[in-house]
Amino acid sequence: MRSIFIFSIAFFVCVITYGQQEPQYSQYMYNMSTVNPAYVTNQSGLISTGLLYRNQWTGIEGSPETANVFGNIPLNEKIELSVNYINDRIGDALSVNNNYFNVDFAYITQLSDAFRLSYGLKAGINSFKLDAAGSDVADDPAFAAANSELQLTVGAGLFLFTHNFYFGVSSPNVLPNDVSIGAFGVAQSKTHLYAISGYVFDFVSNVKLKPSVVAKQVIDSPLTFDVSLNSLLYDKIELGVSYRFEDAVVALAGFNITRNLKIGYAYDFSTSRLSGYNNGSHEIMLLYNFDLLNFRNKHTSPRFF
Protein backbone atom coordinates (compact mmCIF):
# COMPACT_ATOMS: atom_id res chain seq x y z
CA MET A 1 0.00 0.00 0.00
CA ARG A 2 2.79 2.41 0.93
CA SER A 3 4.59 1.71 -2.36
CA ILE A 4 1.44 2.57 -4.29
CA PHE A 5 1.04 5.80 -2.30
CA ILE A 6 4.68 6.79 -2.86
CA PHE A 7 4.34 6.09 -6.57
CA SER A 8 1.19 8.23 -6.70
CA ILE A 9 2.99 11.15 -5.04
CA ALA A 10 5.95 10.81 -7.39
CA PHE A 11 3.65 10.63 -10.40
CA PHE A 12 1.76 13.73 -9.24
CA VAL A 13 4.98 15.72 -8.93
CA CYS A 14 6.06 14.47 -12.34
CA VAL A 15 2.79 15.60 -13.93
CA ILE A 16 3.07 19.08 -12.40
CA THR A 17 6.68 19.44 -13.47
CA TYR A 18 5.87 18.22 -16.97
CA GLY A 19 2.91 20.55 -17.29
CA GLN A 20 4.81 23.70 -16.25
CA GLN A 21 8.52 23.02 -16.32
CA GLU A 22 9.65 26.61 -16.90
CA PRO A 23 8.30 29.41 -14.67
CA GLN A 24 5.77 31.58 -16.48
CA TYR A 25 5.37 35.35 -16.19
CA SER A 26 2.63 37.79 -17.06
CA GLN A 27 5.11 40.68 -17.37
CA TYR A 28 7.32 38.68 -19.73
CA MET A 29 8.14 41.74 -21.88
CA TYR A 30 10.37 43.14 -19.14
CA ASN A 31 12.47 40.06 -18.33
CA MET A 32 12.85 38.36 -21.71
CA SER A 33 16.42 37.31 -20.89
CA THR A 34 15.02 34.50 -18.72
CA VAL A 35 13.98 32.65 -21.89
CA ASN A 36 16.04 34.33 -24.64
CA PRO A 37 19.79 34.80 -24.09
CA ALA A 38 19.94 37.03 -27.20
CA TYR A 39 17.71 39.68 -25.59
CA VAL A 40 19.60 42.97 -25.16
CA THR A 41 18.72 46.42 -23.80
CA ASN A 42 21.26 47.95 -26.23
CA GLN A 43 21.78 50.99 -24.01
CA SER A 44 25.48 51.57 -23.40
CA GLY A 45 26.15 52.96 -19.94
CA LEU A 46 22.92 51.59 -18.42
CA ILE A 47 22.97 48.46 -16.27
CA SER A 48 19.34 47.30 -16.17
CA THR A 49 18.37 45.22 -13.14
CA GLY A 50 15.11 43.73 -11.96
CA LEU A 51 13.30 41.80 -9.25
CA LEU A 52 10.14 39.81 -9.86
CA TYR A 53 7.97 37.76 -7.52
CA ARG A 54 5.02 35.64 -8.66
CA ASN A 55 2.51 33.83 -6.47
CA GLN A 56 0.46 31.60 -8.75
CA TRP A 57 -3.01 30.19 -8.00
CA THR A 58 -3.33 31.71 -4.54
CA GLY A 59 -5.62 29.75 -2.25
CA ILE A 60 -4.23 26.38 -3.31
CA GLU A 61 -1.76 24.89 -0.81
CA GLY A 62 1.61 24.29 -2.41
CA SER A 63 0.87 26.39 -5.49
CA PRO A 64 3.89 27.65 -7.49
CA GLU A 65 5.91 30.58 -6.16
CA THR A 66 8.66 32.14 -8.26
CA ALA A 67 11.29 34.76 -7.45
CA ASN A 68 13.54 36.15 -10.18
CA VAL A 69 16.57 38.47 -9.98
CA PHE A 70 18.05 39.57 -13.30
CA GLY A 71 20.39 42.11 -14.82
CA ASN A 72 21.57 43.20 -18.28
CA ILE A 73 25.11 44.57 -18.57
CA PRO A 74 26.18 46.15 -21.90
CA LEU A 75 29.96 45.89 -22.21
CA ASN A 76 30.05 47.90 -25.44
CA GLU A 77 27.88 48.49 -28.51
CA LYS A 78 28.29 44.88 -29.68
CA ILE A 79 28.51 42.72 -26.55
CA GLU A 80 26.03 42.44 -23.71
CA LEU A 81 25.94 40.08 -20.73
CA SER A 82 22.96 39.16 -18.59
CA VAL A 83 22.60 37.18 -15.39
CA ASN A 84 19.50 35.44 -14.05
CA TYR A 85 18.71 33.77 -10.76
CA ILE A 86 15.34 32.04 -10.38
CA ASN A 87 13.91 30.26 -7.36
CA ASP A 88 10.82 28.23 -8.26
CA ARG A 89 8.87 26.31 -5.61
CA ILE A 90 5.86 24.03 -5.81
CA GLY A 91 4.26 21.68 -3.28
CA ASP A 92 3.51 21.87 0.42
CA ALA A 93 4.46 18.91 2.62
CA LEU A 94 6.15 17.27 -0.34
CA SER A 95 7.87 20.23 -1.98
CA VAL A 96 9.94 20.68 -5.13
CA ASN A 97 12.46 23.51 -5.11
CA ASN A 98 14.34 24.56 -8.26
CA ASN A 99 17.19 27.09 -8.20
CA TYR A 100 18.37 28.28 -11.61
CA PHE A 101 21.46 30.41 -12.19
CA ASN A 102 22.32 31.41 -15.75
CA VAL A 103 24.76 33.71 -17.52
CA ASP A 104 23.99 34.91 -21.06
CA PHE A 105 26.31 36.22 -23.74
CA ALA A 106 24.84 38.24 -26.63
CA TYR A 107 26.62 39.60 -29.70
CA ILE A 108 24.93 42.41 -31.66
CA THR A 109 25.27 42.89 -35.42
CA GLN A 110 24.05 45.83 -37.53
CA LEU A 111 21.85 44.65 -40.41
CA SER A 112 20.80 48.10 -41.65
CA ASP A 113 20.32 51.64 -40.41
CA ALA A 114 17.27 50.50 -38.44
CA PHE A 115 17.60 46.76 -37.78
CA ARG A 116 19.99 44.96 -35.49
CA LEU A 117 20.28 41.23 -34.82
CA SER A 118 21.80 39.72 -31.69
CA TYR A 119 22.95 36.13 -31.19
CA GLY A 120 22.80 34.71 -27.69
CA LEU A 121 24.10 31.74 -25.71
CA LYS A 122 22.96 30.73 -22.23
CA ALA A 123 24.85 28.53 -19.77
CA GLY A 124 24.02 27.70 -16.18
CA ILE A 125 23.03 25.19 -13.56
CA ASN A 126 19.77 24.08 -11.99
CA SER A 127 19.61 22.71 -8.47
CA PHE A 128 16.59 20.39 -8.17
CA LYS A 129 15.55 19.51 -4.63
CA LEU A 130 12.70 17.28 -3.44
CA ASP A 131 11.95 17.64 0.28
CA ALA A 132 9.51 15.28 2.00
CA ALA A 133 10.41 16.27 5.58
CA GLY A 134 6.90 17.49 6.39
CA SER A 135 5.00 14.73 4.58
CA ASP A 136 3.55 11.37 5.59
CA VAL A 137 6.28 9.55 3.65
CA ALA A 138 9.22 11.27 5.37
CA ASP A 139 10.24 8.04 7.14
CA ASP A 140 10.24 5.97 3.98
CA PRO A 141 13.75 5.16 2.69
CA ALA A 142 12.94 6.64 -0.72
CA PHE A 143 12.02 10.01 0.81
CA ALA A 144 13.82 9.89 4.15
CA ALA A 145 16.09 12.85 3.36
CA ALA A 146 16.06 15.86 1.12
CA ASN A 147 17.00 14.62 -2.34
CA SER A 148 18.77 17.00 -4.69
CA GLU A 149 20.45 16.93 -8.06
CA LEU A 150 22.49 19.44 -10.09
CA GLN A 151 21.75 19.82 -13.80
CA LEU A 152 23.58 21.69 -16.55
CA THR A 153 21.53 24.04 -18.74
CA VAL A 154 22.52 25.34 -22.17
CA GLY A 155 20.34 27.59 -24.33
CA ALA A 156 20.46 29.71 -27.47
CA GLY A 157 18.46 32.45 -29.16
CA LEU A 158 18.14 35.18 -31.78
CA PHE A 159 16.77 38.69 -31.20
CA LEU A 160 15.92 41.08 -34.07
CA PHE A 161 15.07 44.65 -33.07
CA THR A 162 14.76 48.32 -33.94
CA HIS A 163 13.93 51.23 -31.63
CA ASN A 164 10.24 50.27 -31.63
CA PHE A 165 10.04 46.62 -32.77
CA TYR A 166 11.45 43.27 -31.63
CA PHE A 167 11.17 39.62 -32.57
CA GLY A 168 13.00 36.78 -30.86
CA VAL A 169 13.18 32.99 -31.03
CA SER A 170 14.93 30.88 -28.44
CA SER A 171 15.26 27.78 -26.32
CA PRO A 172 16.47 28.42 -22.75
CA ASN A 173 17.65 24.83 -22.38
CA VAL A 174 18.30 22.28 -25.13
CA LEU A 175 19.65 19.55 -22.83
CA PRO A 176 17.33 16.76 -21.64
CA ASN A 177 17.45 16.69 -17.83
CA ASP A 178 15.44 13.90 -16.23
CA VAL A 179 15.40 13.55 -12.44
CA SER A 180 15.02 10.20 -10.68
CA ILE A 181 14.95 9.43 -6.97
CA GLY A 182 15.61 5.78 -6.39
CA ALA A 183 13.37 3.88 -8.77
CA PHE A 184 10.98 6.77 -9.25
CA GLY A 185 11.19 9.31 -12.06
CA VAL A 186 9.91 12.60 -10.62
CA ALA A 187 10.70 15.07 -13.43
CA GLN A 188 11.04 14.73 -17.17
CA SER A 189 12.49 17.79 -18.85
CA LYS A 190 11.47 18.61 -22.42
CA THR A 191 12.93 21.22 -24.75
CA HIS A 192 11.07 24.55 -24.58
CA LEU A 193 10.80 26.81 -27.65
CA TYR A 194 9.79 30.47 -27.43
CA ALA A 195 8.88 33.14 -29.98
CA ILE A 196 8.32 36.69 -28.69
CA SER A 197 7.43 39.80 -30.67
CA GLY A 198 6.22 43.32 -29.94
CA TYR A 199 5.81 46.75 -31.44
CA VAL A 200 5.65 50.24 -29.92
CA PHE A 201 3.82 53.01 -31.76
CA ASP A 202 2.49 56.49 -31.01
CA PHE A 203 -1.29 56.32 -30.71
CA VAL A 204 -2.15 59.91 -29.82
CA SER A 205 -0.22 62.68 -28.10
CA ASN A 206 1.47 61.37 -24.93
CA VAL A 207 0.07 57.86 -25.44
CA LYS A 208 2.10 54.92 -26.74
CA LEU A 209 0.66 51.48 -27.40
CA LYS A 210 2.60 48.24 -27.32
CA PRO A 211 0.98 45.04 -28.56
CA SER A 212 3.05 41.93 -27.92
CA VAL A 213 2.79 38.17 -28.14
CA VAL A 214 4.75 35.22 -26.80
CA ALA A 215 4.26 31.67 -28.11
CA LYS A 216 5.52 28.72 -26.05
CA GLN A 217 6.01 25.20 -27.33
CA VAL A 218 7.12 22.27 -25.20
CA ILE A 219 8.15 19.26 -27.26
CA ASP A 220 5.31 16.68 -27.32
CA SER A 221 2.89 19.21 -25.73
CA PRO A 222 0.30 21.60 -27.20
CA LEU A 223 1.30 25.12 -28.27
CA THR A 224 0.27 27.92 -25.91
CA PHE A 225 0.55 31.68 -26.18
CA ASP A 226 0.02 35.05 -24.47
CA VAL A 227 -1.33 38.14 -26.29
CA SER A 228 -0.86 41.49 -24.54
CA LEU A 229 -1.67 45.15 -25.11
CA ASN A 230 0.07 47.75 -22.93
CA SER A 231 -0.22 51.52 -23.02
CA LEU A 232 2.20 54.17 -21.77
CA LEU A 233 0.59 57.43 -20.67
CA TYR A 234 2.70 60.61 -20.41
CA ASP A 235 5.83 58.44 -20.00
CA LYS A 236 4.67 57.77 -16.41
CA ILE A 237 1.84 55.24 -16.15
CA GLU A 238 1.33 51.92 -17.93
CA LEU A 239 -1.96 50.06 -18.14
CA GLY A 240 -2.62 46.88 -20.06
CA VAL A 241 -4.42 43.61 -20.49
CA SER A 242 -3.23 40.17 -21.53
CA TYR A 243 -4.80 36.86 -22.47
CA ARG A 244 -3.10 33.53 -21.87
CA PHE A 245 -4.63 30.80 -24.02
CA GLU A 246 -7.07 28.63 -22.04
CA ASP A 247 -5.52 29.78 -18.77
CA ALA A 248 -6.03 33.39 -17.70
CA VAL A 249 -6.98 36.99 -18.40
CA VAL A 250 -4.41 39.36 -16.93
CA ALA A 251 -4.64 42.97 -15.76
CA LEU A 252 -1.32 44.88 -15.96
CA ALA A 253 -0.19 48.15 -14.38
CA GLY A 254 3.15 49.92 -14.12
CA PHE A 255 4.51 53.20 -12.77
CA ASN A 256 7.71 55.03 -13.66
CA ILE A 257 8.57 56.43 -10.24
CA THR A 258 11.73 58.11 -11.54
CA ARG A 259 13.63 57.96 -14.83
CA ASN A 260 15.51 54.92 -13.49
CA LEU A 261 12.95 53.25 -11.22
CA LYS A 262 9.84 51.36 -12.35
CA ILE A 263 7.38 49.14 -10.49
CA GLY A 264 4.83 46.82 -12.08
CA TYR A 265 1.95 44.62 -10.97
CA ALA A 266 -0.09 41.92 -12.71
CA TYR A 267 -3.15 40.02 -11.57
CA ASP A 268 -4.23 36.85 -13.36
CA PHE A 269 -7.92 35.96 -13.44
CA SER A 270 -7.85 32.20 -13.94
CA THR A 271 -10.06 30.83 -16.74
CA SER A 272 -8.85 27.21 -16.65
CA ARG A 273 -10.42 24.28 -14.84
CA LEU A 274 -8.61 25.51 -11.72
CA SER A 275 -10.64 28.74 -11.69
CA GLY A 276 -13.03 27.44 -9.04
CA TYR A 277 -10.20 26.42 -6.71
CA ASN A 278 -7.91 29.47 -6.60
CA ASN A 279 -8.05 33.22 -6.05
CA GLY A 280 -5.95 34.24 -9.03
CA SER A 281 -2.23 34.94 -9.36
CA HIS A 282 -0.22 37.96 -8.22
CA GLU A 283 2.99 39.21 -9.81
CA ILE A 284 5.12 42.15 -8.59
CA MET A 285 8.08 43.58 -10.50
CA LEU A 286 10.75 46.18 -9.72
CA LEU A 287 13.11 47.55 -12.38
CA TYR A 288 16.07 49.84 -11.75
CA ASN A 289 18.67 51.26 -14.13
CA PHE A 290 22.14 52.18 -12.90
CA ASP A 291 23.04 55.17 -15.07
CA LEU A 292 26.83 54.93 -15.02
CA LEU A 293 27.49 57.35 -17.88
CA ASN A 294 24.68 59.86 -17.33
CA PHE A 295 22.92 58.20 -20.28
CA ARG A 296 19.45 59.43 -19.35
CA ASN A 297 20.37 63.05 -20.02
CA LYS A 298 20.55 62.13 -23.71
CA HIS A 299 17.35 60.09 -23.85
CA THR A 300 14.21 61.36 -22.12
CA SER A 301 11.85 58.51 -23.06
CA PRO A 302 11.96 55.41 -20.83
CA ARG A 303 12.74 52.00 -22.30
CA PHE A 304 9.49 50.26 -23.14
CA PHE A 305 10.88 46.75 -23.72
Image: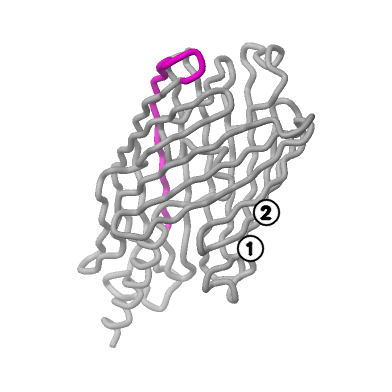
Q: Is mark 2 on a helix, strand or loop?
A: strand
Residue in view at x 36 percent, y 34 percent: 157
Where residue 23 sits in the image (x, y, percent)? 46, 52
Where residue 287 sits in the image (x, y, percent)? 63, 35
- In the figure, residue 250 lies in which quadrant? bottom right
Identify which amino acid the numbered label 1 is placed on. Phe
Q: Does the stretch in magenta take in 111?
A: yes
Q: Which colour scheme is used?
A: one colour
- Are circles 2 and 1 on residues that touch, CB within 8 Å? yes
Q: Name the residue under label 1.
A: 269
Of labels 2 and 1, earlier in sequence is 2
Pick the front one: 182 or 11: 11
Q: Residue 251 carries which label?
A: 2
Q: Does the stretch in magenta take in 228?
A: no
Whether residue 94 is visible, yes or no, is yes
In space, the residues marked 2 and 1 are separated at their CA atoms by 8 Å
Residue in view at x 52 percent, y 45 percent: 213
Left or right of 199 on screen, residue 147: left
- Range of the magenta residues? 97-115
Which residue is at the far front? 204
- Compared with 52, 301 (above or below) is above
